[in-house]
Image (spheres, coloured by chain):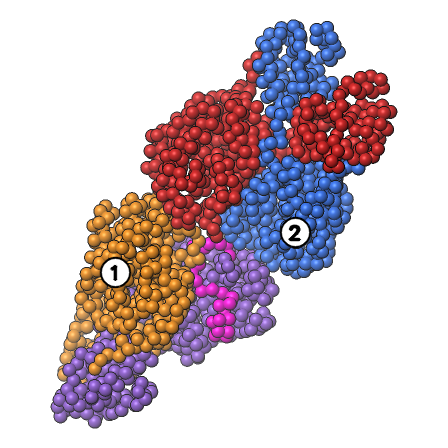
Chain colours: A red, B blue, C purple, D orange
Amino acid sequence: MKTPIPFYLQEILNKVRDNRDGAVADYIPELAKAEPEYLGAAMCTTTGHVYSAGDDEVEFTLQSLSKPFVYALALQELGLSAVRDIVGMEPSGEAFNELSLNRDDHRPVNPMINAGAIAVTQLINGVDSEPAARVERLRTYFSRLAGRDLLIDAPMRDSELEVSERNLSLAHMLRNYDIIQDEAHDAVSTYIEQCSIVVTVRDLAVMSATLANGGVQPVTGDKILDADVCRLTLSVMSSAGMYDGAGRWMAEVGIPAKSGVSGGLLGTLPGQLGVATFSPRLNKEGNSVRGVDAFKLLSKDMGLHLMSTDERYGVNPVRKVEQDAELTVIYLQGLINFNAAETVLYELMESDFSEGTVVLELTHISGTNRMGRRMLKEGLRRIRESGFDIAIVDPDGELEDRTMSDGTEVPKGELEDYAINGEPV
Amino acid sequence: MKTPIPFYLQEILNKVRDNRDGAVADYIPELAKAEPEYLGAAMCTTTGHVYSAGDDEVEFTLQSLSKPFVYALALQELGLSAVRDIVGMEPSGEAFNELSLNRDDHRPVNPMINAGAIAVTQLINGVDSEPAARVERLRTYFSRLAGRDLLIDAPMRDSELEVSERNLSLAHMLRNYDIIQDEAHDAVSTYIEQCSIVVTVRDLAVMSATLANGGVQPVTGDKILDADVCRLTLSVMSSAGMYDGAGRWMAEVGIPAKSGVSGGLLGTLPGQLGVATFSPRLNKEGNSVRGVDAFKLLSKDMGLHLMSTDERYGVNPVRKVEQDAELTVIYLQGLINFNAAETVLYELMESDFSEGTVVLELTHISGTNRMGRRMLKEGLRRIRESGFDIAIVDPDGELEDRTMSDGTEVPKGELEDYAINGEPV
Amino acid sequence: MKTPIPFYLQEILNKVRDNRDGAVADYIPELAKAEPEYLGAAMCTTTGHVYSAGDDEVEFTLQSLSKPFVYALALQELGLSAVRDIVGMEPSGEAFNELSLNRDDHRPVNPMINAGAIAVTQLINGVDSEPAARVERLRTYFSRLAGRDLLIDAPMRDSELEVSERNLSLAHMLRNYDIIQDEAHDAVSTYIEQCSIVVTVRDLAVMSATLANGGVQPVTGDKILDADVCRLTLSVMSSAGMYDGAGRWMAEVGIPAKSGVSGGLLGTLPGQLGVATFSPRLNKEGNSVRGVDAFKLLSKDMGLHLMSTDERYGVNPVRKVEQDAELTVIYLQGLINFNAAETVLYELMESDFSEGTVVLELTHISGTNRMGRRMLKEGLRRIRESGFDIAIVDPDGELEDRTMSDGTEVPKGELEDYAINGEPV
Amino acid sequence: MKTPIPFYLQEILNKVRDNRDGAVADYIPELAKAEPEYLGAAMCTTTGHVYSAGDDEVEFTLQSLSKPFVYALALQELGLSAVRDIVGMEPSGEAFNELSLNRDDHRPVNPMINAGAIAVTQLINGVDSEPAARVERLRTYFSRLAGRDLLIDAPMRDSELEVSERNLSLAHMLRNYDIIQDEAHDAVSTYIEQCSIVVTVRDLAVMSATLANGGVQPVTGDKILDADVCRLTLSVMSSAGMYDGAGRWMAEVGIPAKSGVSGGLLGTLPGQLGVATFSPRLNKEGNSVRGVDAFKLLSKDMGLHLMSTDERYGVNPVRKVEQDAELTVIYLQGLINFNAAETVLYELMESDFSEGTVVLELTHISGTNRMGRRMLKEGLRRIRESGFDIAIVDPDGELEDRTMSDGTEVPKGELEDYAINGEPV
């Protein structure tokens, strides 16, 4: 069998292909050469499955798509506190000044605007790093994210360096306010090298999935970033990633995202997916026209909107309850997080147990988190306090640590030890 | 057994109780009378379970906590297009002007700031509504959200009307730009009445859970808002709800939220939870000091951060696969959304089926969404195209419509019809 | 003989008449009724001579033309310090916010914008004044400025009150920041009454000349304002009077000025002239189109530009010097200010006096100022120190006090006492 | 005799000497070395008389004091239109953004801020000029203004180049918006060279007097700038010269002025004076503390306030009138501008002439302007139309062209031809 997902992606591409609005970015001569008809999409799950359609092998430069990843790398290398000293994390709202620096402390408002990105890049590989070493550090990092050796598009970089007046202006102002230490020219050229790293839409999806996956590259299994770093990065993407219209994007698409003037657009569903599109024509905000269309379709069609409330109905973690006069076995399933544990506890609370033993059967659960484990154990402890015996059946050790809040351990049983009304459970 | 959740909430409250920073709002004389030591928290699941701790019966006025709900009501009554004509949905960033109106079209930038909230209120019950009828409509609506009859705190309202110069200024400017039709005084007094509706922290949690639950009040089952309306409302809350520091809130807490100067603070986890706290002392941004602390703890402890990537690991929708030479039975579980379906399809794609029949067993799934159903059916169709027979076992009719993309139907079987190696499955 | 000045004014009007650009203000219904073809001009010297041409008897409302005069009245009544507590005196530059309030102290940036004018009006007749008494005080004051009883255009006032949302917004915000004490409605209605006072273009010229004349109405001789108050008022007019384009106006016209949406435009040459035009069609900044044209012509033609450097060449205060072996008589003329006195002193310093007596002859001087008098006396004292006798001929007592810095008096002589080479001087 | 003016200046310096508030600028290391106690003042009349007191021989760098002069040079070289294409002429008001560029066209708002000054400098000597040639052009120009060869302080220039991040930022942004053509580094270094030209406070006074004198250096008589250029430059100085507090400066001092961080401060009275002070300690706006104090004293004491209304009282251009039955001789004096001519015409209009001849005697007038001449001639023509003979006595040819508006000439007489009641006039 062939997976239908690429066909699905192709279908999305077909739906947006006829929108030829917008224009290829032309402020960098080399960018202006892009073939406007290119159209590709890719998807990567946190389980490392990659799907793509359309022009999925065409290479293009990262441009602003590099920003969230370099922010993540800075957080990884230096920690939040050091990074926050030089860049904020607020949305820029209606651009209130030419440079988007905070009025009071002159920090760039967030790392998704150029001033912020330039400031962040200067942190990589240590503030004292030589530019070349910093660039190589970045290239290596992006290569790990993509799972293959990525190169810098030298003509693009050179072309961009020629028209970097605005970025040089930002860099000098950052120097003026002691936000960066590097020479302005070095800062900008390092930043532009980072922007000139070449990827495909498949690379983008994989890189995005790495953020979704708590920093583990899902295809290679390479642990690149901490989960906390990913969470912070996605938070900033969600409020400032699509800066001209962050609120509208959140309302319409609901996926933390970032776009680049080369025509790439990436979105990240925490814990789930990386998605990317590629189509060079841009709207006036600088986002890929067909990319935006595709994300709207994907979000709606696939139910990816983070604020969507109707995707989570009816997951009952209690698969079934079997009981007789002396035993109650509660079979759980799915992910046991707070919500699931609450449901379990609620059922326990409502139940009119017979005397004897209460057993939680965990064989079919698909995972737990800290709060879920804590709640289950706390529920068991309270059941015991009410006069019952308790036990769990947990062949995969999902509960990890069985110590309860009173210091005692949850007893562990085997399913074959129990019988309801004489029948093995 | 007693549920441990209130004890858990109490524990959170105990951790934040000693933070006596900040001060009770005093710009409204009646507000200044609030007991600063009050401290309460509540939680309501989308399954309608309500838990609370501390001062959970103390009543206080909604103030700005009313804003997201009235925005939702306006969306419900008039649709997004009409509402967007009078209010934007962008974060306000660093407050760039006194009034937070868009520079070009003079609309308030979002409905979470006063100008926007005043504008939105004037839409309720029809733009031609008498103020009294509008207020009654609002009171009734909030009562449905809370699941009990809510009243207006008349002394508070009167006190606030006395010091409403700023709101009157906003209302007149909105009139000036034809954003609202009502007399400024009527507009402000309606808005203030809405702000003076009295709730407890338990009410807040339930109201918030209604947004989380796609508009169905989870305790009463009352269908109040459409799911789309809730999604839009939560989107705007996520980018503009905690306006002075939306980005930092998203990074640190990661829960769409709204605060009120009365000391209430509510957060909404789409599809999961409503959470609320109450503690009257405010920080300089006007948010409850201990409320903010409590949300940080709750978010971290309970894994509620929307951008968290580490809560979703390892949910395998394929419970087990049984097969012999002529039959493959694939047992699914959990919620079958895109992610789950992708996993199923991926396994199917990888599998080296024997000849014969492939059966998807859906008895233990806990739900589906459109994309999940579509993907399962498409996978089945493609398996059949590869030369197999297909069927589903779906006693609960989870797949809903069994028509596949080629117009044929997925055959339905019963589990007892199948045997693997002669054994019943 | 008939004076040619009205003909000159008529000539100016004829030159601008064909410019029918712009449109009559229509945001106030009553204003929209104005006859767009009206065109008038007037001029009043500080000696009280009034000239006019065109529609010089047509009455129109003051609108913003009232602002500098009410600012002057507030300064007169309360002094600069009290007035500066509620309004600044800076140009507003590119309007940086909706309300033009200072970012830090929320005072309106200057009294020529609506927020500032409303704040200033509330000071008149004491902050505790009843609105009606305040309005009557304003009406009486404007009547004194015009030299005739001025009335309020009641239909205009009522029409304007109907559409005063913007002003009400400002007033409420001023209340909010404790800049004004009155009820917002009272503040705005008082302000609008003041704006609805009816004048002709001749009145405007006379009122403007009163500012030019140091506060003495030049026709009636009524002393209305202190010279200091006029100087401050003209200073603020010069930097903020034509706010959208204050710099351009200063460069092109160079006359402190104020316009009103009724089509009036007034300019004040300190010490010299009041000028006014009337033509209702406005450009997009709200200034009378033909009024602006006429002022440009007048400024250039008449050499009225305050920054003009070429109008003052060659005024030699030393009319002639007569001398023989024992006497030097220096005949002065014109206004003896610092510049003139410097010239006199310079000549004295350069001169190779004969022995004997030095006499300053002041019969033909046209005036002095403090610095001029001081310098002359100091020069005389130094001449005496060099060994000469000194005296002045000052039949009109222009030197006022003859005490020099060493405490002695300048001796006074009579022209007939002196002879040069035997000839009477 | 020795002139008392230096003593007067010394007196002013003594009054301000004890104010030791503020601090020497230290952002440029070389500037920080300035002796804080230096204190000097100078004055230069449009007749070329220079007075000074205190540290009047100490040299310091121009810094921002160069701005108005370079603006003037650009106007002189390219004309207003070309200069306005790259820089505005509006006050900046409360600094509304980091760069003070217009929101729409990105031009610097005026030439008195750094962005504007850098842009203007790039125009000098042609936009294609080599930097070195441009600098030499500037140095030569400033030398002509000062009347002596000025040099560039190389250590200061080098020190400033080291800390020019902010200016480089501005220059790159100006390049970005195509406001300047030069490389950013060249633009800034040219600008800094200009700022590093070394002057004394006497030089400043002379340079300022050149602006006051319509572009003629009053000491050397060198015609450097057109009068129109000076008028425009002074206009911009008056609205934007003391940018943080332009309105307050105009109200308190009333003299177009410019300051530099080296401690210099210059003021220009059009047609009258250049004034300058030097004292290195700066207030927080960057203006010399004692310089500001001195200017306040000078303005008040000497009656230099441009908006002063009380310095011009009572200049009667009609010295005397002599008449008998057949002849009226009107003796004029002073400067015959519009105001004076109006007074003359008014007297003529009011007069009840005898029949016969009306003669205007111009021997004692000290000058005329175009409007004054026009008005006199028009008055004479009208007198003739009323049936009189007319003539002028104008030994110095002050009326220049005697052609009246009807094409005929004013007859010229000699004083000795006339007699009143048989007596020679």
Q: Quadrant of the C terminus of chain A?
A: top right
Q: Is residue D251 above or below residue B112?
A: below
Question: Dot 2: few (<14), some (14–19), or many (≥20) neighbours within 10 Å?
Answer: few
Quadrant of the rendered structure where residue B343 is?
top right
Q: Nearer the viewer, residue A407 or D65?
A: A407
Give the Cα separation between the discs numbered 1 and 2.
Answer: 60 Å
Q: Nearer the viewer, residue B63 or B325?
A: B325
Mark nearest the camera among 1 and 2 is 2
Could you tell me which residue is drawn at 31 percent across and 68 percent down?
D38
- Can you see residue B127? no
Residue B157 is situated, as x and y percent measured from the top left of the image, at 69, 56
Residue C305 is situated, as x and y percent measured from the top left of the image, at 31, 65
- Chain of the residue under label 2: B
Residue range in magenta is C76-99
Q: Is residue B133 above or below residue D15?
A: above
Residue under label 2: B19
- Relative placement, left or right, of D200 versus B52 is left
Q: Indicate yes or no whether the magenta region holds residue C274.
A: no
Amino acid residing under circle 1: Val
Could you tell me which residue is drawn at 24 percent across and 89 percent down?
C391
Residue under label 1: D198
Residue A358 is situated, as x and y percent measured from the top left of the image, at 80, 27
Specify the principal SS of the magenta part.
loop
